[in-house]
Amino acid sequence: MPIIAMFITLSTFYIQPGSSRAVLKLIGEQPLILLVNYLPPLIALILLYFVINNLFYAAAIISLIFNVCSLVNRLKIELRDDPFVPRDFQLVQEAINTVSDFQVKIKYELLALIILAVIMFLVIGHFIKAKKIKIRTRIIGCVLVVIAIFFTNKYIYSSKQVYYNKLHVSNRSYISRVFNELGFTYCFLYNLNSYPVEKPANFSKEEVEDLIKTYTTSESAMPEEKPNVIFIMNEAFSDVGMNDVFTYTSEDDPYKYWREITQSKNSIAGHIVVPGFGGGTANTEFDVMTGMQTNMLNSVPTSAFRVVGKNTQSIARVFAGNDYQTLFMHPGIVGSTIDIAYINTLV
């Protein structure tokens, strides 16, 4: 059983993107990486063995699950540079649409290896029959494995101490690289524990509802002529001229026309500081549209779009509730991307 679990572990490492040699080097430097990726298939294998009473049939199922997930992770990283995480199970329809709209290069050789491994275990399981285990023993075994799952999840796969202090990566802010260096299985399970929104200390639902009532008015402030409202969020724009290192003259100032606009009597301009840098720009979009702060949702850096799973009040909903048409665009532009939330009046 330990050998089969190790085979599944190494196969998930082999399937994930990146150099297998680099992975082996990392495991040699940090043996804990191998352990945290080895325990899940081992525990899952033991649990399923007690359930169906056939080690190799159990191995076929566990091998299929872990290796297919690792393949999906590889495809998602290659397509979007974004790893496969638990929340993605809620985006099955989006994934189907993506596959149909783009030419996804499926690694058929890896898919063939996964299928061959499953067939191999099924054939061996057909010819090698395990000794039947008593129902009572199987039930006790399942209970013990469930207990083991609870404790390993609590002290290993949800532990920030292990993630941040025991396991080292070259760039922790680059999530795809973290998955490749620490292993898909471990990172997937760690992320499973990272997404729940944490309840703030001394939080009171009644107090929040009272605040809403206090600051909600029934008076209408709608102008006679509804203006068009456009939000433009340029991910690559910043006023570098604020830094003393840059000294521009009026002739070579790259922000010359932008400054003319901001200094116009018809504009209201200022500087803001966004909570994100070098990535995670979707969080800024969420913050602007909802008025909430992503970094307050959870103590672990994450994306609001992965932790918020229900309809949420936003500026767009407020405008839509006042007979506005709303539109969101995210066009790709060389060198930068611009998000435009265009809230237009009904004609």
Image (cartoon, rainbow, N blue to C red):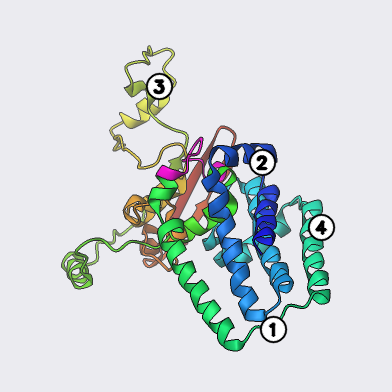
User: Which residue, given by chain and number where applicable, does mark 3 sit on?
Assistant: 256
Residue 10 in percent (x, y) is at 67, 51
Going by the numbered disc 1, the residue's amino acid type is: Lys
Sequence-wise, which precedes: disc 4 or disc 2? 2
Sequence-wise, which precedes: disc 3 or disc 1? 1
Residue 278 in percent (x, y) is at 46, 36
User: Which residue, given by chain and number where applicable, does mark 1 sit on?
Assistant: 132
Q: Quadrant of residue 4?
A: bottom right
Q: Quadrant of residue 258?
A: top left
Going by the numbered disc 4, the residue's amino acid type is: Ala
* The label number, if any, that marks residue 18 in the structure image: 2
SS of the residue under disc 1: loop
Other residues around mark 1 within 10 Å, as few (<14) / some (14–19) / many (≥20): few
Q: Range of the magenta residues? A: 165-177
Q: Nearer the viewer, mark 1 or mark 2?
A: 1
Looking at the picture, tell me which residue is in the foreground, 33 or 138: 138
SS of the residue under disc 2: loop
Q: Are marks 1 and 2 in contact (CB under 8 Å)?
A: no
Q: Is residue 230 above or below residue 308?
A: above
Q: Nearer the viewer, mark 2 or mark 3?
A: 2
